[in-house]
Structures are given as C-alpha cells and as structure tokens.
Image: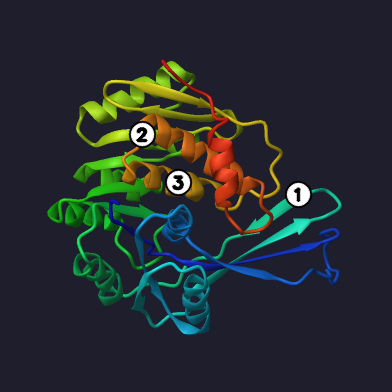
Amino acid sequence: MTRILTLTPNPAVDISTSTERIVPFSKLRCTTARRDPGGGGINVARVIRRLGGEVLAVYPAGGSSGRRLAGLLAGEGVPCVEVPVSAETREDFMVFEVATGLQYRFVLPGAELSDGEWQECLAALTGAEPPDLVVVSGSLPAGAPEDFYGRVARLAKGMKAKTIVDTSGPPLKAALKEGVYLIKPNLREFQELVGRPLADQAAWIEAGRSLIDRGEVELIALTLGHRGALLIAREEVLVADGLPIKPISVVGAGDSFTGAMTWSLASGHTIEQALKFGVAAGSATVLRPGTELCRVEDVRRLAADVITRQL
C-alpha cells in the first residue's frame, strides 16, 4: 500500500447540534453536541483510514481544544504528528434547523501561526518516513505565508512524493507553480484559478488542459456538486454523473471526495475507479448528519452505482 501523509495547517474541532428553529434574540434549546476532528487534511486522513489506507496526519494544535482534537483522532485510530503551537485550536460549529431541514455552518478563523510554528509544520513533513503521496488541504491560517502549499510541493518533490492539493485562491496558485499531481477544485474555485468565467463543459476541459500542458498539474478533479465530477488528464477526460441523493449535511463532502480518491489512487486503481470512489464518498458523506463523514459500507455500495463515461 502506498504511504500517504496529510498536512492540515488550519485544523479544527467541528461541533454539530440541532434545534427546532433558529430565531433571533431567543434561547435556542439544542440537542447534545457532537464533536469530530476537522480541517481539510484531517478529514482526508479520516476517510483514508476508514477505507483501510496507510496514512499519517500532520497538523498544528494548541490549548484545550487542541488536546480534544488529539483525543478525537486517537479515538478514530488515525496516526498523527502534532506540532505544538501557542494559540488555541479553533472550533467550528454547525446547527441543523429541524423545522426547515436547513443547515447553518459557522466557520471561525484559525489561530495565527508564528514563523517558527509554520516552519515546524514543514519540518514535520520532512522528518516523517518518506511518503509516496502528500495531501495538503484546507485554508491557511493567519501567519502562514501565501506560498505555504508551494513550499510543501517543493519539499514533496525532494522526497520523490506526489502532491495532491485541495484549496483555493493564491495558495492553490502557489502550489501549481511548483507542479503537483492532482488538484480538486469546485467550479467556483476553478474559475477563480483561471481568472475567467467558464460557460460550459468544453470550456472547463480547455482550461484544464491548458494547466496540464504547462506542467502545473497532471490530474484535475473538478467537483460539480449534485451534477457529479469531471476528471481531466492529458490523454483523457472522464465524467461521473451525480447520484440521486437528498443531502442531510454537506459538511466534509469535498474532503471525503479527496480522501477516497487519494486512497483509490494509492491502492493502484485506475483513475476511473478513483473518480467513482471520490463521487461515492462525497455522496455517502451527505447522507450522514452533522460532521460524521462517510461510512465505508455506504462508499462501497454507492461506488458500484456511479456511472462514468469518456468524453
């Protein structure tokens, strides 16, 4: 099994609860809160672990919420390297409104990292047993340089590892300057990356092929929500139709897509199989309430239902 390392510079403890109706100025009686490990790369590692992959999660953490995060990850059996930092690890929270079936997500900013702390995160990457795949995912906290993910990609190349990136904006552009293996933008993030509106599928493919031809990336997994996903490679383009699922929660769906696709590629599957597992895991996650992420039995069941075709 290919070794995978995830790096999450902006982790969180995700809290989820529900209340009958959200109204201003009133006490809102909520159900017992559920807490899960959170942050892009941490969620990716959780999914890889559930699917049986070999993964190591690297992340900075501090304070009582940082200790809680470590305990939650230990409870899921995810091997970790924690970089101690002085600031408290952030908490995000989600509230489900029972009366309407709507979900409200509140995302707090991550604690600022000092120069020494973000540099320790990079040192933890190079100090680990050399991986075959490095996954960097999520937003950057204050204090981390804009080219942080670019630095990660450069270090990964030095270790002869391939880099998978799931982020947006300037951090994504910085990573592409170093050349990476795979990126997973949604359509909004992809249009932001190329700097122009992309009206249709042909435009998506043309823009993706341009990035590939410039040597910035090998594979682009463009996620399209309920419409499925498009996988652009140098020699082929694959489309996967979305599954007819009514979402309960959207928290972690993109991370689950990245995690399952990474696990599949690390397992030696074809890119078509990896795309199917990605769509299946994202779909399986929206079936779960709150911040639970996908269940393995749902991922494997739904993967058999994902229809793909070549364009």
**Residue 202 horizontal/vertical position (percent):** 42, 16
> What kind of element bears circle 3?
helix
Crowding at mark 2 (Cα within 10 Å: few <14, some 14-19, many 20+): many
Residue at numbered disc 2:
220
Give the Cα distance between marks 3 and 1. 27 Å
Crowding at mark 3 (Cα within 10 Å: few <14, some 14-19, many 20+): many
Mark 1 or 2, which is nearer the eye? 2
**Residue 263 horizontal/vertical position (percent):** 39, 47
Vertical order, 75 against 132 (above or below): below
Give the label on residue 102, or none: 1
Q: Is residue 37 left or right of residue 165?
A: right
Find residue 106 and report its image quarter.
Answer: bottom right
Q: Check disc 1 and give the amino acid type.
A: Leu
Nearest the viewer among 281 and 2 is 2
Mark 2 or 3, which is nearer the eye? 3
Find residue 18 and report its image quarter.
Answer: bottom right
Nearest the viewer among 171 and 55 is 55
Give the Cα distance between marks 1 and 2. 31 Å
Give the label on residue 66, or none: none
Q: Residue at x 48, y 34 (%)?
A: 276
Q: Check disc 2 and give the amino acid type.
A: Ile
Crowding at mark 1 (Cα within 10 Å: few <14, some 14-19, many 20+): few
Residue 195 in view here: no
Closer to the chain start, of discs 3 and 1, is 1
Q: Residue at x 34, y 41 (%)?
A: 265
**Residue 193 horizontal/vertical position (percent):** 37, 37
> What kind of element bears circle 2?
strand
Residue at numbered disc 3:
260
